[in-house]
Amino acid sequence: MPVFLNSSDADFETRFRDFLGSKRESDVDVDAAVADILNDVQTRGDAAVIELTAKFDRLTLTPETLAFSAAEIDTAIATVPADEAAALELAAKRIRAYHEKQLPDDAWWTDETGAKLGWRWGAVEAAGLYVPGGLASYPSSVLMNAIPAQVAGVDNLVICAPTPDGKVNPLVLLAARLSGVETVYRIGGAQAIAAMAFGTETIAKVDTITGPGNAFVAAAKRRVYGRVGIDMIAGPSEILVIADKNNNPDWIAIDLLSQAEHDASAQSILITDDADFGVAVAEAVELRLETLERRDIARPSWADYGAVITVADLDQAAALSDRIAPEHLELCVADAENYAKKIRHAGAIFIGAWTPEAIGDYVGGPNHVLPTARSARFASGLSVLDFMKRTTLSMMTPAALSAIGPAAKTLATSESLEAHGLSVGARLDQLNEARDG
Amino acid sequence: MPVFLNSSDADFETRFRDFLGSKRESDVDVDAAVADILNDVQTRGDAAVIELTAKFDRLTLTPETLAFSAAEIDTAIATVPADEAAALELAAKRIRAYHEKQLPDDAWWTDETGAKLGWRWGAVEAAGLYVPGGLASYPSSVLMNAIPAQVAGVDNLVICAPTPDGKVNPLVLLAARLSGVETVYRIGGAQAIAAMAFGTETIAKVDTITGPGNAFVAAAKRRVYGRVGIDMIAGPSEILVIADKNNNPDWIAIDLLSQAEHDASAQSILITDDADFGVAVAEAVELRLETLERRDIARPSWADYGAVITVADLDQAAALSDRIAPEHLELCVADAENYAKKIRHAGAIFIGAWTPEAIGDYVGGPNHVLPTARSARFASGLSVLDFMKRTTLSMMTPAALSAIGPAAKTLATSESLEAHGLSVGARLDQLNEARDG
């Protein structure tokens, strides 16, 4: 049973706080094991990666077979049904079009002192994309990681995707090709993160690593952060649907289940201003759960973490939503486009009942790699900017230095940084001499 | 003695690689101690913070005196000499003007299917700025952290600044006031990071923590990353000067020392296309070191980590610079503005001999919190974006869903995510029924 809350109940605030504070991540501490793996790969390179892949993925590799060959990729791609290939191509095209609009502008202007100031954006040279294996091996995730990197202008893009027992999803390889990635290593876990962060004899070191993964991958990314850039540390994901009574309860039920079917620790929440509608949705969820293919995952997610929250009005719904800061937010209310302006914290907003969240997972255009576990309060979804960095620029003239240099010298002296002051002062002295001489 | 390298030497590549790979960070592992401190503050709140401050800073606080009172701030600010206050105000004004140009644009457009797509940027609600105590307690760093947050539109800004033995730099408090920060806690170390990340009875939890610090602060930021946003994990900093022979060797020497005087593990590098000029700069450095106030810091930095690299031409200098990816890069060459275009990886570029790096530390306008230790390959300096996050937006119409929904359904089926497909399919079914009916 999901939790049912009503904002008119006396204990609502307490129960909502408990709900907000409830933990969905397991506490299993893999950090020590991950530290050993990182150290092993840093020290022994390919040999360590190959041994760990044999151990964890039951797959025997050599330095030559760490990556798929072009022929292997060709062969796998040839097996993809035409309708799936066409769907993936449409997704790639739409994701590319959206992310191209994210390319940031450079700037270079002259201020009132005559100083020129600005900045310039540029892509990282090499990026590594992690694609989980097994249940979560999603070709759509390949597109969502690789296309922003490609649009950013990254020179070298590689993918690490574990293939337990040698099994690979051909659509993952097609997605790689559609995103311009030629090198796909069949390795995973902390050893894949280590290989990309430190480099091995065969695998070149990258500058930035993105992509979701299990607890080992997350711990490895945290440890290499700073040595390389990373996108984020992903946690269990969630959907929040705000819906009024003028919705089909079954549509909302399926939308909630589309999150619940990902993972037993995913969270699906409905906020409505109509208690009867909330009950109707919960009943529709139960009905769908009777036949849903992934009911063994979706049912515990809904039972353990699901919630139906009834509020007095939709303003209250928006306020509660900001406290949840959901990864995905569906707004199935009247004039949803305007209502969206009430929301401050969310990874992605799906506006109106014709915009099920699943559209955003595949073909909408915006990225589906989004801040989880309330981190939309401070974090953004994956974007072109994750694969770029900004260099600031400044260029003084003698006149500009005369205007602002004395203040710099004063502050340097105040901070007891003599050489800082001297480096400005020596130049000011020459200007003064030239003027006075 | 700094290292002297010449690109025409047979062993140059080997020696340059060794130089690049040399480690300046100490290996002291404070992570276990930091984990204990975080846990203590999370569990016991104010009491833990107060005990740890008594232990590390020899300062006895109560919940009421954790923060400076407005009267204490007023009293301290009144002691600031007028010229220093004016200099700080000029710095604040220029930093604000630069960062206001960084405010990102929202977007909202209609694509060829009729779908509306876009994004919206917003500020985090609360940010905490860490300001180191002791030697590195710099009012300029307060401005560089707080003004971007203020420009971003952060609602609640607090500073944690340790005051060992109760000593505080009045300019730090003035800088806080100039940046709109009213709350300054006199706490530091991992306990301050913990207090801001978890919250205590007195100190409200923040969303994002920025600012440099020692090894304890860095380890604490790494551990709370994901629970809150952080700016970066700062390492020892460096300056690279590319200078031709048409420069005053003393100016370049002071510029190199302005980095070396920060920290014995700072690094100062000169690349020149004239070996004699390199020698002249090294001699000028020695001369300046005889009298420099902070020579006990600058001398070991220069001797242990300094370098003078002679190259065949300035194209080679730019290529080596990109391998170093310096935090600060000064370009003292002819037509420096055009030459800057050859550089791909640097935190900040100071263009031309009239732009000493120290200008950027105080009054230039760009941020002085920059990616260190080669991380300019993938990271950017602090900016308004560090205090903002982006929410993506999408809004389908029935026509748009008809156009792209079937591809989403195909991919969902291919990924064995039935509910994803159903959530699109149920809507498509209704559209088909309406059309056919």
Image (tube, coloured by chain):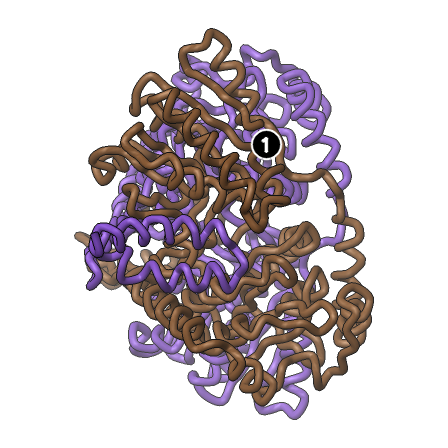
Chain colours: A purple, B brown
Disc 1 is attached to a residue of which chain?
B
Residue drawn at the location 36% of the way across and 42% of the way down: A148
Q: Nearer the viewer, residue A402 or B391?
A: A402
Relative placement, left or right, of B176 versus B385 is: right
Residue drawn at the location 53% of the way across and 59% of the way down: A257
Three-letter amino acid code of the residue under disc 1: Ala
Relative placement, left or right, of A81 versus B45 is: left
* A422 vs A406: above or below: above
Could one spot residue B270 in this view of the protein? yes
Please provide percent x and percent y for residue A33.
76, 37
Residue drawn at the location 69% of the way across and 79% of the way down: B66
Please provide percent x and percent y for residue A92.
32, 39
Q: Quadrant of residue A111?
A: bottom left
Q: Which residue is mark 1?
A: B303
Q: Nearer the viewer, residue B268 or A387?
A: B268
* B394 vs B320: above or below: below
Q: Secondary structure at mark 1?
A: helix
Q: Nearer the viewer, residue B148 or A88?
A: B148
Residue drawn at the location 63% of the way across and 81% of the way down: B68
Q: Quadrant of residue B59?
A: bottom right
Please provide percent x and percent y for residue A151.
31, 39
Q: Quadrant of the N terminus of chain B?
A: top right
